[in-house]
Amino acid sequence: MHMLSVWTCARFTVLTPTPRLAHWKVTAYVRKGREPNCGPPDAAALVVIFDVPAPCDKSFATSIEVEFFEPLYVGDVVTCTGKLVDINHKELKVGKGAFLRQEDIYTKQTGEVIAVSYLDIFRFVTPVGGSGS
Amino acid sequence: MKSMTGIKLSTINTGDELPTISIPITLQRLVMEAGANRDMSLIHHDTQVAQATGAPDAFVNTYFLLGMFERLMRDWAGPRARIRKIGPLRMMIFNVVGETVYFKGLVESVDLAAGTVDLDMWVESERVKTVTAKALLEVEN
């Protein structure tokens, strides 16, 4: 178990809808005074699972669980720490790969934990000659 | 019974149904949603890439489901209810472009002492149940 990356998001100006919390950790595509982020459209750092080196070219999410402890208020600054906590190798109909589980811990400037989430994504390689279907 | 600020805990019973929400999945909706939630993964708005992963077409992402489940809960419980937990939320079958999906739920149990309600929620397409989710909601007395 090791830490893969840490994000710190911008200052909130409005109260966020509860499940929206996850998006504030994603790098903004456009920032004042900077060139827009026009990299590959799937390059957004939504999940650290994709930072894990693996010979997998395809993926889809299979489950998520989020527990919310503290509400967010105007002016709160949120930090999210993502960690890979499990890898479970599997071969499914779509191909050979692994279920990867990511734990995200969201804290606010006071150190209070706002939320903890667990996201499972199956990353895999399509069999040679197959389309994955 | 629902007041201006939302439902009251004392009026909730096990087995109560949440009002169903139906929503057509269109490519335009998925593109707009990707722009809003920053999940630009091509599987959620490009048919060919989605099909390469085994899906029949571009499909909704995890955050769309979380957002719609929040709407399902808030439409029923009101803005003062506090979502304590969503999950496990299991995505069993892709929700794809061209389908209309239905978000549904019911009250699994009520804890008057804790002031909480356990919900059992799910998504149905015209074919089958595609997603299941549990939730824990804090509701005022």
Image: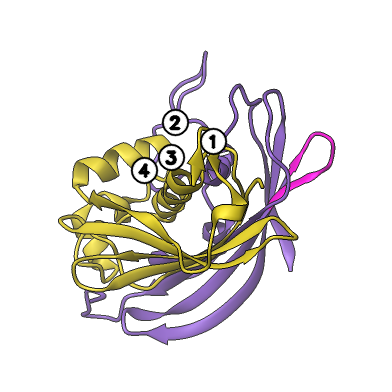
Chain colours: A purple, B yellow
Is B97 located above or below residue A8 in the figure? below
- Please say if the residues under marks 1 and 4 sit with CB atoms less than 8 Å apart: no
Element carrying mark 2: loop
B27 left or right, relative to B44: left
In this rendering, the label closer to the viewer, 1 or 3: 3
Q: Which residue is mark 3?
A: B38
Residue in view at x 60 percent, y 30 percent: A15
Question: Of the residues under marks 1 and 4, which one precedes in the sequence?
Answer: 1
Query: Residue flagged by tag 3: what amino acid is it?
Result: Arg
Dot 2 crowding, Cα within 10 Å, few <14, some 14–19, many 20+: some
Q: Is residue B137 left or right of residue B104?
A: right
In which chain is the residue bearing label 1? A
Q: In this figure, which residue is indicated by the disc labeled 1?
A: A27
The crowding category of the residue bearing disc 4, from other C-alpha atoms within 10 Å (few below 14, some 14 to 19, many at least 20), is few
Give coordinates of residue B134: x percent, y percent: 52, 66
Report the residue marked by disc 2.
A37
Towards the viewer: B91 or A103: B91
User: For the residue labelled by badge 3, is the local secondary structure a helix, a strand or a loop?
Assistant: loop
Residue extent of the magenta highlight? A107-115
Q: Amino acid at mark 1?
A: Thr
The amino acid marked with disc number 4 is Pro
> Residue A126 magenta-drawn?
no
Are circles 2 and 1 on residues that touch, CB within 8 Å?
yes
> Label 1, label 3: how many angstroms apart (C-alpha)?
9 Å
Q: Is residue B84 visible to the viewer in this orientation of the structure?
A: no
Q: Is B48 rendered above or below residue A55?
A: above
**The numbered mark 3 sits on a residue in which chain?**
B
Q: Please give the residue where the numbered disc 4 appears in the rendered image.
A: A41
